[in-house]
Structures are given as C-alpha cells and as structure tokens.
Amino acid sequence: MQVAAGFDLVYRTGYWTPVHVALTNSGALFRGTLAINILTRAPRARVEQLSPWNFEQAVVVPARGSKQISLNVPLYPGINNLESVIATLRDDHGKVIARQNATHGVSLQAGEILVGQLTDPQVDLETLETIFLPGQIGSLTTIQLDASTLPTSDAVLENFDILILDAFTTSSLHANQLLALQTWVNRGGILIEVGGPEWKRTLGSLPDSLVPVTIHGTRILPPAVSIVPTNDPLRQNMNLLPLSAALPESIEVSVASLRQQGPFSENETLLSVDSVPLLVQAHQGQGIVCYLGIDPASPQLMNWSGTQELWIMLLTHALGDQMLIPIPAIGYNTGPGELLTRAGILNMLKPEMLPGPTILVAFLCGYALILGPLRLLILRRMKQPQKWRLPLFMSIVIIFSLFAYNLTFYQRNASIVDTSVSIVQMSQDSASAHVTTYSGIFVPNAGDFHLHRPGENLTQPLANQFLVTNRSQVAKKDIPASITASTNETQVTLQGLDAWSLHNTVTEQDIRPAGKITTHLFLHDGKLMGTISNTLNTTLSDLYVLLPHRFANLGRLAAGETRQINVPINNISQQSGNSLADQIAESGGVTAPYSPYTHNQSPQTDFQRHMALLSSLNGNDYPFSQCKGSCKTRAIADKGTLFITGGRVPNPSLNDYEPLLIPGATATLIGWADRPLTNGITVNGWQPISHQENFLQMPLSLDLAQSLPIPPDVIPGHMIDVESFDAELRLPGIYAMDNGSITFEMLSPDLSRLHANKMTITEPDLWAHPFGPDTGFLPSHLQAQLYNWYTQTWENITLQQDAFTTTYPEAYIGPGGRVLLQISNKDSSLGSLYFAPPSLSFA
C-alpha cells in the first residue's frame, strides 16, 4: 500500500485535501475497508494524537490485481500541528491488514500562491516558475492537473489560487468538475484560459459563465507587431517595457469580441491588436476570468522578450491586493466553513424548544384525566357501575400502556432535532451556488447515530476546539465518527453519543439551483430602480441590495414573481463606524449590534433571527483571540485565511471591511429563502424535526450607464501595478507606502449613454485626514497623477478635500472606460503614506 496526500505531494492545512492510495493484492480477492485519519501534535507537546474520525471507503481488490483510490479528507488541525496522514486497510472482519503513513510532502504557507495547470503534456509553461511577484516570498508553485485529478468539489479546488487552461480538451471534464469550476471562480478563484489555434478544444465546452468573450475564429498576426496599444501607459513602464517589443514571428491568434451581456462585471480589454482583444479580464463574483487570445506557450514566442512580462502584467492585474498583504503577517486558517470569523452561528444551532417532553407531559395529563374524572363520569352513566368499575379501569391501563410503549419508541427517534444555518453563495447568473451548512444535531438518547446527507457533498463533524462559544466543550475529546462519501451521498456515523446531547457538523456542497434570480437595476437620484425576477421554487424574504456604505430594502419576493423596483437608498457615514448589518437592523427597529444569544436571549421574530445571523456573519458575537482585540482593526480576511497585521495605521476604524459585501462585485443581493435549496438530512432513517435558516448572497451588476448621479465608492479602484519595495496592505482598504508608486484602475461607464457633466475622483489621504476629508491638521505628502490618454502623459492633480473634479472627463477615460490613477510619496522624509483605494463618481 502506497499513500500520498495533496496534489503531487503539495498540500495546505485548513482545506479539504485529496489522499491517493495505491493497493496491490498478490493473493485472492480482497474485500474490506480503507480508512484515513490524521495525526496531530499539540504545540510544545511530545504526545501525538490520532484523530477519532475515519474517512472510509469500501474496497474490492481483484486477485493478483491493483486498485487506485482517492478520498477527500479535511486537514483542519486548528491550533495543533499536522504530523501525518495515515491510511489503514481492514478486512471484512475489522482486522488490520496494512497501515501506512502518507509520503511526506510540501505544506504551503499562508500567502503562497498555488497554480494548477490543465494543459497538454507538451505545453511549456515553465516561465511561471521563474516569476517573482511583488510581496511574494518565493516563486509560484505549479501543479499539473488533468481530467482525472481535477477536483469535483469547490471545497477541494479552494487549494488553488489560479487555474490555467491551455490546449486542453475541456469536453473530457465531468459535469461536477465544471460545476466546481464555476463556484470556485465565483468564490474568488482566478481562471486563465488560453485561446489561440486550440481555442475550440480548450474553450468550446466551457459554460458561457466562464468565457467572457465570443470567439469568431482565428487570424494570423504578422511579425513586428506590438500587442500593446500605442497610447497605453504600459509603454512607459520600465519594468514591463519588453511587453511592448514587436513579435518576432507571425502567430495565429483567436479573434473574439467582448460579451456585452452575461454574468460578468467590469469586462475589459487590456491588450489588443487592430481591435482584436488579446488579453481580456472580467469579474465574476469574487473571482476573475482572464482570456488570452495569444498563447504564451506558443513556439513562435520562444524568442520573444515579453513572455515573462506578459505573465507578470496579467497576474498583477488579477491578484491585486492579495500581493500586498505583509509578508510578516501571521496567517491563521479560519476553520471549517470559515467558522472562526463567524463563530456566533454556533449559538444559533441550539434547539430552542424540545417537542419530546411537551408531548410526554401532554400524554401523562391525558392519562390522568381519563383515569380520573372521565372514568368516573362514564361510570355514573352506566346502569351497573360497580360491575364495570374494575374492567374499565384495567382496560384503560392496558390501552394506555400499549400506547405509551409505542409513543416512547416513536419519541425516541422523533425527538431528534436538526437546527441548521445554510449560507448559499450564488453565482452572478444564478446557474450555480456553493452551500455551506452548519448543523446542530440534538439527540435525546445514547448510542450510535447515522446521519445521511444526499447529493455529492463534503461533511465533517466539528472538532471541539472550534466550539469557541462553549468553553466547557473545547477541552473535551472529540467523539469517534466514521464518514463515507460517494458521488450521491455522504453517510456520517457518530459513535457513542450521550443522551440529550448536541453535536455539530459542517457540510459544503455545490449545486445547480432550480430557477434563477435575474435583475436589471440602476441608480437614479438617490433611489434604486429597475426590475427583479425570482424563478426559484421558494419565496425570498428580507431582500436587500447592498453597496459600499449604502443599502436598499426590497422586502419580500414570491416564487415566480417579477417586480418593478423604485426604493430609496439608505446612506451610512463611513466615519460612523457602523456596519451594514447594524444599519439594516436599526432600520427595522432592532437595537444594534444585535447579539441576543450572548445575553441568554432568543430572537422572537423572523426578522430578529435574520438580524442575529447578520450579526454573526459580521463577527460581532466572537472576537478571534489571536487578533488580541477586534479583528476588524487588526487583521485582513482573505479566502479562508486571517492575516494578523496589527493594524498600524493612523485610524484603524476607517477600513472597508464589510463581510456582507462580495469583493469585486458592483452590488450584493442578500436575503432568506423560505425553503432550503438542498435536500434535507435524515438521522437513523428518520426525518428529524428541522429548524433551518437559508441565507442567500449573490453578486449583482448595476447598469451604471443608466445611473446618474453615481455616488463615490460605487466604482472602486483596483490595484493593477506596484513599483515599490515597501508598499503594504495594512488593513482592508488601507495601504501604507514610503517609496515608489501604486497604480489603480477604475472603469467608467459609457459616457455616450451616461450624459454626465463632470467626473470626480476621490482619493482618501488617511494620514492628513484620518477621520474623513474635513478632519486632521497634518500636511499631505500624497502625490496623485492621472493618466491623460490624449497626451499620453501622467498629469499631476491637486486634491481638494481628498477629491479631484474635472468637466473634461474624455481626456482621462481610455479604451473600455479605463481611468488610471497613480499614487506616490512626494516627500518620504515626512514619513509613510496611508491611503485608501480611489473611487470614481459622476454628476
């Protein structure tokens, strides 16, 4: 037996990870069970501890044959250190036949970038291994994948930061792999897809939600052509100057046009030749899809000096702020289902009222009533009451005894309660969704319990060390459990449970919802207007559209309903420090921050329960201890990792951390589904009493060309280039820099449709104005430069109260609506710059 964990022996702790086992049988037909456990060691301890959880699969190995088995296992050691992954093979009688530790692999540290390559073997992408990006401690780690090793679940695919498709037959991928790919992009993955002469094979089988262009065929570019437009500032970037060099040979490229409709926002062309897009970047939810019409691995580009710079420019654009998280920052995994940043959800998993005792009390009261007053009343109406007194008494006792036995047996199973909270993260076109379900299973009696969850999913019991809201449980040992997963279901057996006890599980699942939510919304004079349609098979309650520092209440939307929207937008002052969750609660008459469970109270209405969940998602109910205070002012949350930076800025409270907003999306739709979007759980074959919260979160695109005025923060700037050795992202939306420059890009709507008279760029200087534009007394040493596409020069601009307004926006809006702003320190002797990303507004 040979065991290997991870992808080519590369793995991350805090993620679901594939474990590959090769079995060889030299004897007769073998039937048995393969189980995977993890071995951990507590910090500064010598004793190793084997996890009591077995991730199992039944195996059959033919006589003198072999078998390859892959199981997905969660590597969540928490505060402990992961020592090893162990595979145990048992026969049908439970006898251990073999036990083997996994081959020692490479564990990636928080912040290191993992790139998966779906390519033909002959495709040469070795250039990626020589690239060093700003803020990275080493080169990129690349893993070769194929149709047999690409995960079928987003929870496993989350190990990768970037996936590259180049000369690959995507028709060989399974439907579940494509679904995982869609949800992975929507939740923050970067997908790079290469067209060129092999575009049909690579892109032809991908869903429209993963291709931001429509490809019309191919053409030959002649030699001596530059792929950088003549007026692009890239030609002035000394570090990327080779990118402007002419192509050495003619090369075949794919001809495409941008999709104007579809599940993308900020769809832009970055490189082109003769109006043929060669590099396109589009936002899809939290993630990014990049299309290359030219193949960097083409033999014709082997002698081109710009290949490495092409990759650097593409990756810098796509990764953005992720590259500037400080290297010294300690990264902590946020636990199963990112639980440590939303630990208040655990309080919502406790059953509020148990039906079993209520029914038994009612039964006993009925028994006493019939045996006493009702029996005497019946006897009074009989002609010979003395004759029937004893037979009637014995009949009642016998009937109620038989009934009590059956009722007790029924109550033993029917009193099982499943209290769950599901976070449904839908894609921008509603075609796919990732569902994270936190379940609290309450059992009334002792013994083993079998949990069955239908559909392909990844389920794990919740280790006691993650029960941070219940200190008495943290130090206890985890209960033994066996988990068996297949493509259609997952079976979890919890062993030796105590009576009247609560046990938590976390499930992650990718689904294709039956129906969609479609919108066409825009802003107009402080209102949200347009239409919204719901074709899901459930009514949606407490719907809100969220924007930075703003929200609009849409109320209730029935299944099958289409509604015209014309509602006011509620504004929140950034200086107030209030979160969207707090403002939504207060708008509904609930005192914020609303944390009833921490005060031993329970919500009394649906709206209060919904606000309690928003408070939990906002992290109000539990501060992560490693932050040594509020994580909002001391850490950066990035894709399942919490980087502790310590803050170290003039005003840590003025960061833009807002967990209810989807990063990269123009707007976010949130609400609650009255019915679950996944199939329910069964326990010991019974449907438990269920109390479910189904929270939906979905990225939206607004029709900004129809919106006027457009307020600040609606069109944010994204970091696309950094020419500095000390630039850092200290907190969400707060940069620090001594020397060098950072370039931001903002995408303007089509001015021919917008009819705006003036354009304003807001650039918060958080050193000179730490509490807002009208505050502070320190002199500003922030230098802002705006790129003029007409003169092809960077122009110094003067900020008045952190803003610059022009009535001639056409000069500063380039192809595709690109507006470029460069920030530098004009006097480093005055200390570091502290600033936020810019934003664009129109009036």
Image: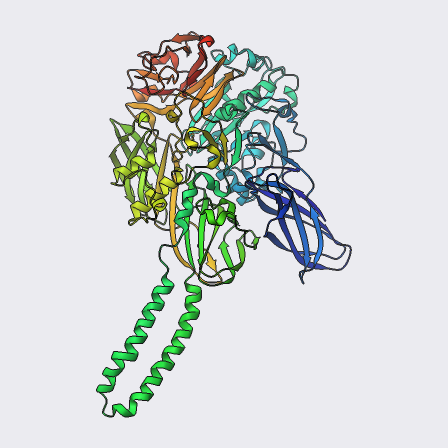
The answer to whether one can see residue 280 in this image is no
Q: Where in the figure is residue 267, as x and y percent of width and height? A: 44, 26
Between 265 and 410, the one lying in front of the other is 410
Residue 31 higher or lower than 347, as above or below: below
Between 772 and 133, the one lying in front of the other is 772
Image quadrant where residue 117 sits? top right
In the rendered structure, the answer to whether residue 149 lies left or right of residue 385 reads right
Q: Where in the figure is residue 277, as x and y percent of width and height? A: 50, 22
Image quadrant where residue 94 sits? bottom right
Residue 4 higher or lower than 66, as above or below: above
Total numbered labels:
0
Q: Residue at the spot x=50%, y=25% of the render?
A: 325
Q: Residue at the spot x=47%, y=36% of the render?
A: 625
In the rendered structure, the answer to whether residue 117 lies left or right of residue 603 reads right
Residue 22 higher or lower than 806, as above or below: below
Q: Residue at the spot x=43%, y=19% of the render?
A: 745
In the rendered structure, the answer to whether residue 541 lies left or right of residue 156 reads left
Q: Where in the figure is residue 800, as x and y percent of width and height? A: 32, 12
Instruction: Give the position of the C terminus as an image quadrant.
Output: top left
The colour style of the image is rainbow
The answer to whether one can see residue 446 in this image is yes
Q: Where in the figure is residue 357, as x and y percent of width and height? A: 37, 64
